[in-house]
Structure formats: C-alpha cells, structure tokens
C-alpha cells in the first residue's frame, strides 16, 4: 500500500500541527521524530497515543539512562527491573515475593480520595497480573503542615481513600510512613506499595507471543475518567490543575476484588500467553508494551470495547485510564475458557483483536483505521526518547552545610529538656500514627505477626513457617541537605528496619519523587540520589527490582523536598526467630549496638528549634551498616535479643521511649540509664554532645540500633559485636517504674504517652 493511499485510509478528526503536539506535552524534536517513525503526520489518535506513551510517567525519558546504573540483579532475581509489571525474588520452597511501589501524587493533590484509592488499586493490579496473590500493602505519605485546613483536608481524604479501597479488597496494611513539611503543601506525595506471593511456575508475563492469538479486554467498562492521566502526572501542578479532575481516575474496589480473583483463576489455568494491567495511558500502554516485548503487533477493534459512556471516539478509548481493566493474550482454542471464567465473576471478557506479525499497532473505530504505529516506537527501550539533562549543584547545599549544630540555642536544664522531649514526641512527624493506621485493616488475611507501629511490618508467608519483613523509608530532609548521602541513608535505614525484626534484606523497590527535571538543580538532586542509592544497594548486595519515577512534583512555590522513597523486603527464615519491637522485661538490659554518631543537621529537633533545615546529615559507614544487619540476622537466629528497634528519627531519647512504650498494653516498663556508659557515649560523640545534653539526646544518627537483652545473653551479644566489629554500649536497664530516667532528665511515661498518642488526633477530628 502506498503512503498516499494509507494517509487517505487513516481517519483523523483534524490536520495535526506542531501546536497540537506542543499542547500534548511533546517537543518539536519529538514531533519530528514521530513523523519519521510514521513517514507522515500523525492522526489525532496517534498523537494522543504518542503523547501518553512518551510522557515521563510512561517512558521515563528523563530518567532511564540513570536508572540503568542501579544494580538490578542478585542470585534471588526472578524478574528484574523493567522486565515485568513488578520485581520478583526467590524466597525458597519454590515461592517468590513480588513487590513494587508507585506514586499517585498529582491525582491525590487534586482529588485526594480517588487519587489515593486508585493508587492502591493500580499497584495491586501490578502484583496480581504476575500471578501473585497480594498479602500486604504499605504506603509512604507526605503532606504540608496539618494545622493548615487544605493540608488537613488532603491528609484525611487520602488516608480515607487508601483505607476504604484496601479494606474492601481484604489486603492487610503492614506498615508505612507519614511525614509533614511545608514543601508538600501544594503537592502532596502518595506512594503505595504492595507485596504478593506466587510459585515460580505461576509467574505470569506481560507478553503478546504468537501471531493470530486472540487479544481480550477483561474487567470493568471504559469511560472518560483518567484521560491524559499519564501526561497530567508529567507536568507541574498549577492553579489550573483543579480543573483537570477528568485526569483523575475513579476506582471501584469491589470490582477490583472480582478482577483479582478472576485473574488469578485464569492464570492458574494456563490458558493465556500474557496479561497486563491497563494503567497509565490505558489501552495504548498495554497493547504497545506487550507487543514490543514479543516483537509483534496487534490489530484492535475499538467497537468491541465495553463502554460506559456514549459517543467515545478512538482517542478517548485508547487514552482512558478507567480502573479495574486488563489486557489478556490467550492461547488459541481456549477463548471460551477465558470468557467463562470472567463471566463467572460477573466481569467483561471480550475479544477485541489479535496479535499480528508485522509489529504494527492498528486501531479501528466504526470501520475507520485511526492509528497504525510501529509498537516498538512507543515504548521504553524502543523508540521512546531518552535524555540526560543538565545538572547544577544548588548553591544552598554548601551554604547550609556551613551552619553548625551549635546554632541551635543551648538547652541544659532538666525541666527544659523534659518539656522539649514532650513537645518533640507530639510533633506530627514523631507522634503516634494510630489515627492513620486504625483506619486500615491490619489483621485481615491472618498474616500479621506485628505492625504497623514498629520499624518493619512482619507478615506470615501463607502455607509456610516463614515470614516477610517490609518497610518504607526516606528522610526527605537528609536528601535535601545532601542528596547522595540522603539516599544512602534511606536504603540503610530501610535495611535496619527489616533487620531488627530478624530478617535478611532481600531487595528494594523505589519511588523517586522529585521536581521538574528540566531545571538543572532538580536534576542534580535526582542524579546524586540515584548514585547514593546505587552505592548502598551494592554495599548490601541487593537489587533494585523496579519502582517508579515521579517528576514535576512542584508548584508555583517551588519543588517538594526530594524524596526517593525506599520499599524494602526482607526474609525471616523461621517465625520463631521474629524479634519484637517492644522492650518489656523488667530487669533486662538495654544495649546500643553499632556506631553512635549523632548530628542535628536535618533532625526533627533542629526543625522544631529553628523552623529550618540546615547543616549536614549524620555520618554513614556503608560497610558498618552491612555488618550491623548481618549481626542482627545472626543474633535473631540465636535468640540473642528479647527485642530490637532501629535508632533514627527523633534521636536516642525518642528511640528509647518508643522501645519501652507498648501502645497495646496499659502498663509499660521504665528505663534507667547507666551513667558511666552515657558519659562514654557523650565523649565518643564529641565535645558538643558532651556539653550539650539536648544535642546528645535529640540529634539523629545512622548505624545504630537499640537491643533489649536478657542478662543471661549478655556474653552472647558481646561475642556477636566482636565478631562483626561493632561498637556495643550497655546503656541501661528496664525497671518497673513508669519513668525514663536519662540521668540528665526524667520522663514520666504517662505524660510521654499522652503527648505521643495525642499529637495527630486533632487533625482527624470532625
């Protein structure tokens, strides 16, 4: 067929110009590249498809070159980053853990309930489309100060959306984090993570092998919600964003539950070649990515797509991001089997096309050919553009680094220290997150061992005597002050979070939340954070299994604090070796294992005292961090610890309080510090910390954990510390008193508990 004949056959509602391309978020260079791939000007539908697929959200065009530098393999790898919908790691006994974290930031900033809810739904589908049954979820949330009405509204509605959707699905929430900073006032961050289990042979792939094989649309109907959601997520938020509610999808968790069960039943039959969620860019993404992966194409008839709105054209159907939908490539002769399974679950299952061998994605509507595109030209790793942007170190980094910890006004008297502690633990970033996690079902599925509320949530692996430990973590302030160090700290803290539960860190998924990549200072922060993440993962010999990049997280007020969120998964080989986070045995010992090197830079105490972020993050020794996690893993296996807790946000005093305070028991044990050990710790921390008890107790550190040890196990712990060349300080003991005696000051536990539990409550009251 000649070019002129093809152009006549292709249907377009208008003649496409450069202005149309620019309006779709494409550059002039990209518009020219599209015409080169097609050999002509694109149709309206084709322009929409390219716009969605070449958006940052789908193509990772400004990040992929750097993402490729991250370690992606380990001996446990079964599905590496970018290969499938999510990463998969071997956990023994023929089982794999499948896990991923993704953002739904911009939709949540516009419509927080549906934005957060559909974020949960989307990440769930990424897991069960691989044949894995989700067993738990986590989230990482960032909002502006909750005492501002708009921020409070976003917080409450986003939490409600997460809770309602997840609870309806019957998937337990095992952990997460919640952080507040003014930079998130106009651009909140909502990152959702899901973890699932599947047998090795049960892993499903997103492929379209076999020309002539049937292509099925399954699940819910298609509407106009979510159109241009992918490109919307690839732009800065503005005052006009409120008008883009049509770019926010609407979820139905009950439909998702049906889709989950139907999909897992279908995969188990072996009747399919491949399956993929219709997420960002909808049908455009699933058809092109599955085709490109198999070096095939698809012929799609949109007249057969189940619609819930009249008059939808090809452009709208291909770009819709309506929820709870899948694309399935079936095996020939088993079409009715596919239909019957979805009919059983009261879901649509319609053959809308077939696989072809020429590599073209052809789309027809009402008998008209609306698009004919080389599938490979649309996708990451194929024809989608790849850029490495200009970097420039922000001037503020060196300026803030020069400001010493001592710039915080000195506080030395006992009454002032006590008041400061109580003020600190009721701050939203440190206060109990009970008002949040009590809206989530944490017990459903009978998988919970402990969490949320600890460092890492621990869930049983169904049908085994083993468990997974899961955590999300990132201190955005540390990344802001020094991005490479901050990213290293995020990986190491997430590793400690699972290690203190008795788990061996297996791998991470990431959600990289940054500003506009075209601004050199923003891209510097991103590139340095990638480097730091790579450093830490290589030190631990763990892979990055996948994740998500979310750029353009900024408003007219500027970018958010850079937030490379880490989702960590660890394996506990025996449920009997799970370590509790609660110190509870009176008369037992408390030890600090690791290296105590506190810094006020970026700490909650500094922010409370100065209303600012300045200085440098805590020191970090990657080799020490690895040795510390190895020691914790061995110690858990030898039952050397009664309990353990990571030492990080809030510093030593807050870490001790959270260790002895049991939120599920009306009576907690007290703590009495060992004066000699504390004097030695102060001396090793430096002169400022010896003479400034506020800096000693409230500054934050890396590379250290608190242990609760039975007196009979003291020598065993000392031998463990020696074996791994770790510092060990016996800092005190547990008492029957309802008091924390820190020598420099005392804290009544009832007062501390009241402050801690009450910190977030006012922001969730009606």
Image: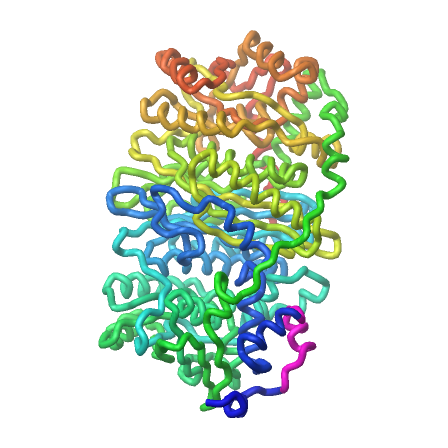
Say whether residue 149 is visible. no
Residue 606 position, x and y percent, is 70, 31
Identify the residue at image location x=41%, y=72%. 220
Viewer-proximal residue among 608 and 615: 615
Identify the residue at image location x=41%, y=36%. 505
Residue 364 position, x and y percent, is 46, 85
Left or right: residue 53 versus residue 97 is: right
- The answer to which image quadrant residue 127 occupies is bottom left
Residue 568 position, x and y percent, is 45, 41
- Magenta residues (range): 15-28
- The answer to which image quadrant residue 40 occupies is bottom right
Residue 439 magenta-highlighted: no
Viewer-proximal residue among 666 and 660: 660
Identify the residue at image location x=44%, y=46%. 72
Q: Is residue 232 above or below residue 489?
A: below
Identify the residue at image location x=52%, y=41%. 534
Residue 19 magenta-highlighted: yes
Viewer-proximal residue among 172 and 184: 184
- The answer to which image quadrant residue 386 occupies is bottom right
Instruction: Give the color scheme: rainbow, by chain, secondary structure or one colour.
Output: rainbow
Residue 693 position, x and y percent, is 67, 17
Q: Is residue 65 above or below residue 256?
A: above
Left or right: residue 560 versus residue 376 is: right
Say whether residue 369 is visible. yes
Number of residue marks: 0
């Amino acid at each position: 067929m000649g070019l002129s004949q093809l152009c006549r056959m292709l249907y377009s509602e208008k003649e496409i110009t450069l202005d149309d391309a620019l309006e779709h978020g494409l550059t002039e260079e990209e518009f020219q590249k599209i015409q080169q791939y097609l050999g002509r000007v694109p149709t309206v539908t084709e322009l929409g498809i390219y716009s969605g697929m070449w958006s940052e959200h789908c193509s990772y065009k400004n990040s992929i070159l750097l993402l490729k530098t991250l370690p992606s393999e380990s001996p446990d790898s079964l599905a590496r980053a970018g290969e499938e919908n999510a990463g998969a790691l071997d956990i023994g006994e023929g089982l794999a853990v499948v896990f991923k974290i993704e953002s739904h930031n911009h939709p949540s900033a516009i419509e927080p309930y549906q934005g957060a809810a559909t974020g949960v739904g989307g990440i769930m589908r990424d897991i069960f489309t691989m044949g894995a049954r989700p067993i738990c979820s986590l989230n990482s949330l960032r909002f502006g100060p909750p005492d501002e009405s708009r921020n409070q509204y976003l917080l409450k509605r986003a939490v409600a959306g997460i809770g309602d959707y997840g609870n309806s699905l019957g998937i337990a929430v095992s952990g997460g984090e919640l952080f507040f900073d003014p930079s998130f006032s106009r651009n909140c961050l909502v990152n959702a993570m899901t973890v699932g289990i599947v047998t090795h042979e049960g892993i499903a792939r997103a492929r379209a092998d076999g020309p002539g094989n049937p292509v099925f649309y399954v699940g819910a109907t298609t509407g106009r919600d979510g159109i241009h959601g992918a490109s919307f997520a690839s732009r800065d938020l503005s005052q006009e964003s409120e008008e883009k509610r049509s770019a926010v999808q609407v979820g139905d968790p009950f439909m998702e539950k049906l889709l989950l069960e139907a999909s897992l039943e279908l995969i188990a039959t072996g009747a399919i070649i491949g399956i993929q969620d219709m997420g960002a860019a909808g049908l455009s993404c699933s058809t092109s990515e599955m085709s490109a992966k198999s070096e095939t194409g698809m012929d799609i008839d949109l007249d057969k797509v189940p619609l819930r709105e009249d008059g939808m054209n090809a452009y709208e159907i291909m770009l819709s991001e309506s929820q709870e939908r899948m694309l399935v490539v079936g095996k020939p002769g088993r079409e009715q089997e596919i239909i019957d399974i979805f009919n059983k679950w009261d879901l649509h299952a319609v053959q809308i096309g077939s696989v072809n061998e020429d590599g073209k994605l052809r789309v027809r509507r009402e008998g008209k050919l609306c698009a004919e595109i080389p599938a490979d030209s649309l996708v990451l790793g194929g024809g989608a553009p790849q850029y490495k942007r200009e970097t420039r170190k922000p001037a503020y980094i060196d300026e803030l680094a020069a400001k010493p910890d001592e710039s915080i006004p000195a506080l030395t008297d006992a009454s002032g220290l006590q008041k400061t502690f109580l003020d600190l633990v009721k701050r939203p970033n440190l206060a109990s997150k009970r008002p949040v996690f009590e809206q989530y079902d944490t017990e459903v599925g009978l998988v919970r061992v402990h969490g949320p509320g600890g460092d890492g949530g621990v869930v049983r692996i169904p049908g085994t005597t083993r468990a997974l430990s899961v955590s999300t973590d990132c201190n955005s302030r540390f990344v802001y002050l020094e991005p490479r160090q901050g990213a290293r700290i995020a990986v190491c803290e997430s590793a400690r979070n699972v290690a203190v539960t008795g788990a061996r860190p297996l791998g991470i998924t990431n959600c990289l939340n940054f500003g506009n990549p075209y601004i050199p200072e923003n891209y510097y922060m991103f590139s340095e954070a990638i480097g730091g993440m790579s450093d830490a993962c290589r030190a631990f010999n763990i892979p990055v299994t996948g994740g998500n990049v979310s750029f353009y997280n900024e408003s007219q007020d500027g970018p958010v604090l850079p937030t490379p969120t880490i989702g960590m998964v660890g394996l506990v080989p025996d449920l009997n070796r799970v370590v509790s986070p609660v110190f509870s045995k009176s008369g037992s010992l408390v030890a600090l294992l690791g290296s105590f090197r506190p810094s006020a830079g970026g700490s909650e105490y500094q922010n409370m005292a100065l209303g600012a972020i300045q200085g440098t993050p805590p020191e970090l020794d990657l080799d020490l961090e690895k040795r510390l996690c190895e020691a914790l893993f061995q110690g858990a296996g030898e039952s050397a610890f009664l309990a353990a807790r990571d030492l990080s946000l809030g510093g030593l005093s807050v870490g001790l309080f959270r260790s002895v305070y049991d939120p599920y028991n009306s009576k907690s044990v007290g703590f009495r510090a060992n004066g000699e050990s504390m004097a030695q710790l102060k001396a090793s921390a430096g002169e400022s910390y010896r003479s400034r008890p506020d800096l000693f107790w409230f500054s934050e550190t890396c590379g250290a954990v608190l242990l609760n040890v039975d007196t009979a196990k003291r020598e065993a712990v000392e031998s463990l510390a020696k074996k791994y060349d770790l510092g060990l300080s016996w800092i005190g003991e547990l008492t029957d008193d309802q008091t924390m005696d820190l020598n420099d000051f005392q804290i009544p536990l009832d007062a501390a508990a009241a402050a801690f539990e009450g910190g977030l409550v006012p922001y969730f009251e009606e």
